[in-house]
Amino acid sequence: MGKIYKTLLFDGKISLSILETTDIVNEAIKYHNLTPLTAATLGRTMTASLFMASNLKNEGDKLSVSVCGDGVGGHVIVSVDSSLRVRGYIDNPSATLPLNEKGKLDVKGCVGKGRITVCRSMGLKEPYTGSCEIISGELAEDFAFYYTVSEQEPTAMALGVLMGSDGKCLSAGGIVMQALPGCDDETAKRAQDIILKYQDISAQIQKLTAKGIAKEHFSGYYFTERNAEYKCICSSDYIDSLMISLGKDELYDIINEQGEVKVECQYCDKKYVYDKEKIDKLFDK
Ligand SMILES: [Zn+2]
């Protein structure tokens, strides 16, 4: 289970969120056979996306995040709903690169140059889409930049995924501070300086857990706690409706060529197979 802890600092001028996403990254590794490099890339993106979704106001709201760079991993797509159910995938899950000059996983090389796009769907209202350039590729700086330029909310963020030698994630998570309306420059600077102390956030989570960081480093503050999980919301009903929208003729064409219609969910690799009988039944309903 993933966790998000939130509180307010400095007379309510700064919001602080601490996320632990180790289990979520391990689920993604299981679904997609990720390498340590792609696990770190998808894991950081899922952590930032969960933070974004934790700010959604209404039940049923959801958002999708696309990190579209020209690095070896290809595009990274993550989708989260207001209940903090997250799912995601990376185009090239088997991508690898040598460690960077700091001896760390080269997430920057995995992401490359390009754009981050965030699309928020909120009930009947038009979806909101924001976007910014990828300025670093390490992702924490990029998502902080996204908030600052696209949402006008000055943000500082650290993200981390620590991988074990067995290919499993040892710890993952992030820490985010956002300036709220009325925040002065001096307070914003103080928040930024605090985030600088968490550049090895995954190691700190491994040592203390996110809850421990909240308790020991920010003692005296009241934190709210929420659960998050890796969960795909695809279902046979949803795929049925997708089939119907394609139309009977199109589906018959595929069956004549390939014998069956196969749909694979990109988020959880679940396979949905339709033969002629199943398609006829679908359209008889
Ligand atoms: Zn699925």
Image (cartoon, helix red, strand yellow):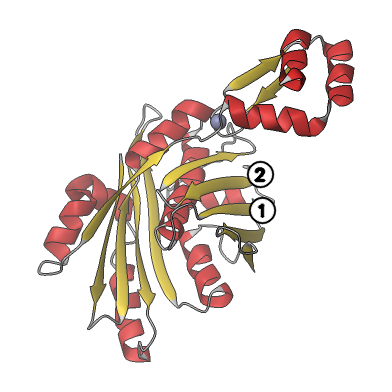
Residue 255 lies in what quarter of the image?
top right
Q: Pick out the residue farthest to the left.
A: 220
Ligand 1 picture quarter: top right
Residue 252 lies in what quarter of the image?
top right
Image position, residue 114 (x, y; %): 68, 59
Frontmost residue, 61 versus 4: 61
Q: What amino acid type is highlighted by mark number 1?
A: Gly
Give the residue at mark 1.
69
Give the residue at mark 2.
74
The residue drawn where x is 56% and y is 63% is 136
User: Could you tell me which quadrant the N terminus lies in?
Assistant: top left
Tell me, yes or no, whether the two marked residues, 2 and 1, touch with CB atoms within 8 Å.
no
Q: Earlier in the sequence, mark 2 or mark 1?
A: 1
Determine whether, in the image, residue 181 is placed left or right of residue 282: left
Q: What amino acid type is highlighted by mark number 2?
A: Gly
**For the image shown, how many numbered marks are present on the structure?**
2
Q: How far is mark 2 from mark 1, CA to CA?
A: 6 Å
For numbered disc 2, what is the local secondary structure? loop
The residue drawn where x is 40% and y is 48% is 83
